[in-house]
Amino acid sequence: MAGVMTALPGERKRVCYFFDSDIANHHYGSGHPMKPHRIKMTHSLTMNYGLYKRMEIFRAKPATRKEMAQFHTDEYVELLARITPDNMEAYAREQAKFNVGDDCPVFDGLFEYCSISAGGSMEGAARLSRDKCDIAINWAGGLHHAKKAEASGFCYINDIVLGILELLRYHSRVLYVDIDVHHGDGVEEAFYTTDRVMTCSFHKFGEFFPGTGELRDIGHGKGKHYSVNFPLRDGITDENYRSVFEPVISKIMEFYRPSAVVLQCGSDSLSGDRLGSFNLSMRGHANCVSFIKSFGLPLLLLGGGGYTIRNVSRAWAYETGLAAGMELGSEIPMNEYYEYFGPTYRLDVPATNMEDLNTREYLEKIKAQVFENLRHTAHAPSVQSHSTPTMPIDLDDDVDEDLDDPEERKPQRLMDAMVEKDNEFEDSDDEGQGVGPRKDRQSHANGDSNGKPSTTPAPVPATEAVPSMPTEQDGPAEAQADTSVAMADA
């Protein structure tokens, strides 16, 4: 029996939801706080509420090494692909170099786990850019600590950076918002010197991992003032969190005017988390999703931290419902993990009587300084001087790039594709079906969120040669087209 849901007022959004049941087969090790099993718990709860009727559900194609190397170094990706618990002794030197071990342990299927996480975020971003949905959800993503050549904070591959790079192919400005209790250091570092991406992180600061994200960290060079950090203290409540989150995001929207948003919904900021120290209720956390959604921009929702897994699945299921325009009832429906939600068997995660160390004066002082930093940003910064990231996720092509001759500088496949075909600019077969005809909807390939011509270079059609990119990786894109429905665990 499906759980009770209530339709929310407002326009219904087209939601793409990504889930791969294999994610639950991976385990960081006994005693480790990160439990990939929480993704399957979230999925079970979501499906048993009946939300599958309100969304399109996909199993994304796992990301390849070449796609990961758009951000990460080849040597680092190669290590993740090769290392196993059986051979890890032979890679002791590489483990020390790339910080693999301890908090980021080696376990069976490590690379597959990374591929699933990154694949969902990249394909979600691609579908947003192609106007195939309004909101894309990948709760297996949001691993915001991973660096270019370093594992960190339980994160190996930074799926968020890879997703944002995909969005930048079509969007001139992307906003990244992080509500995890930990600072989103890996994403901030990746875009610290560019104005194409503004990062905004609300997090605990002061003798707390990763130790970065103070108020004065605002970016560098062309990216100066495009990194926003709001350091918080223990015990912040729903009311105080809302009093800073909504004004700061509103001001960013006013000054920066992004055309797409990525929201990392780390649920370790919930009350009662094993590693977190905030006091947000489920509804206080979910208010951030509702507020970001209210701006009507293409939205990529990702997971992140969260170590009390019964509360993680509650919050993410509820936020999936909000994205799909439904409010889930408080009584949890029967599902395969029903016993986890005892003794109350209720959906809500209530706040506690924990002391809030964030005084009104402190929050107002930080907010005033954030506003002052934002005042120095140029309204809607120009993008003419920036190169467009390459290797798009092509949802319709299924070319096996492994057949290309590695000794050939430009594979014949790409040379053949340079010939303009008669149907080059026709709609693909699946467009115009489902919610409504695509021709009547906005395309982010042709303009920004206000319908104005975009200053970003036009996206590369699937059949044209891909230009060289400003990173270390050259080569054609691998198709990202597997969208088989992941309903087996519903």
Image (tube, rainbow, N blue to C red):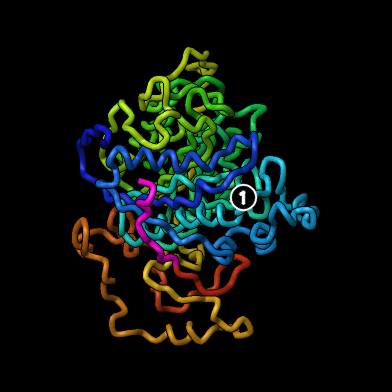
> Picture quarter containing residue 215?
top right
Residue occupying the point 63% across, 36% down: 32
Q: Residue at coordinates 31% horizontally, 59% vertically from top-left?
A: 131
Q: Is residue 183 above or below residue 388?
A: above
Residue under label 1: 156
Residue closest to the eye, 302 or 166: 302
399 vs 365: above or below: below
Q: Quadrant of the N terminus?
A: top left
Residue 193 is inside the magenta segment: no
Regarding mark 1 in the picture, which secondary structure is present there? loop
Residue type of the residue flagged with mark 1 = Tyr
Whether residue 195 is visible to the viewer of this picture, yes or no, is no
Judging depth in this view, the residue of 2 and 178 nearest the camera is: 2
Depicted 12 relative to depicted 309: above or below: below
Whether 483 is among the magenta residues is yes
Query: What is the x, y in percent for residue 126?
Result: 40, 60
Q: Main secondary structure of the magenta part?
A: loop
- Relative to 477, residue 224 above or below: above
At which x and y percent is residue 180? Answer: 51, 35
Residue 337, percent from left and from top: 42, 34
Labels in figure, total: 1
**Res 324 seen here:** yes
Between 456 and 111, the residue placed more toward the observer is 111
Side of 90 where 200 appears, left or right? left
Q: How many other residues sit within 10 Å of disc 1, few (<14), some (14-19) or many (≥20)? A: many
What is the magenta range? Answer: 480-490
Q: Within the image, what quadrant is residue 461 found in?
A: bottom left
Q: Residue at x 65, y 49 (%)?
A: 107
